[in-house]
């Protein structure tokens, strides 16, 4: 797992039902907590570049603050446009840290 890099500490994870933006190596990431389960998406919305990490969680999906596209945290898909998918980043929480395969 050497290609997984540290995103943040476990104590910095967003509370259940919220998202948080974390920047790693200059790349904005959206860390989402859906019912206690952490997921990571690229923080730049694939629609028009909105900040997904400043969005919200609704119906188990990350909602972009700009035009309210709702992205599945597992597939990156949304219901508005099948050609616009968020980038889902493989991530794990272990040893007190969130790590992702960036
Ligand atoms: S920029 Fe995110 S929905 Fe438009």
Image (tube, helix red, strand yellow):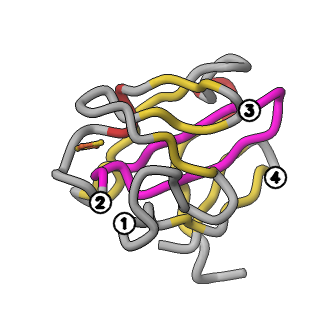
Residue at mark 2:
46
Closer to the chain start, of discs 2 and 1, is 2
Closer to the chain start, of discs 3 and 2, is 3
In x, y percent, where is residue 19?
Answer: 53, 28
Residue 53: which quarter of the image? top left
* Secondary structure of residue under mark 3: strand
Task: Label the magenta part by its dominant secondary structure.
Answer: strand
Q: Residue furthest left?
A: 48
- Point out the frontmost of discs 2 and 1: 1
In x, y percent, where is residue 80?
Answer: 42, 51
Q: Say if the magenta span includes residue 91.
A: no
Q: CA distance from mark 1 to mark 3?
A: 21 Å
Residue at mark 4:
94
- Point out the frontmost of discs 1 and 3: 1
Residue 25: which quarter of the image? bottom left
In-image side of 15 versus 49 (left or right) = right
Closer to the chain start, of discs 4 and 2, is 2
Dot 2 and dot 1 residues touching (CB under 8 Å): yes
* Secondary structure of residue under mark 4: strand
- Point out the frontmost of discs 4 and 2: 2
Residue at mark 3:
34
């Amino acid at each position: 797992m050497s290609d997984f890099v540290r995103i943040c500490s476990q104590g910095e994870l967003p509370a259940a039902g919220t998202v948080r933006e974390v920047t790693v190596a200059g790349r904005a990431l959206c860390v989402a907590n859906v019912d206690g389960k952490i997921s990571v998406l690229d923080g730049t919305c694939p629609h028009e570049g909105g900040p997904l990490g400043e969005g919200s969680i609704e119906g188990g999906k990350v909602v972009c603050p700009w035009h309210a596209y709702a992205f599945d945290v597992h597939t990156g898909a949304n219901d508005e446009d099948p050609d616009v998918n968020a980038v889902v980043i493989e991530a794990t929480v272990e040893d007190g840290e969130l790590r992702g395969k960036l």
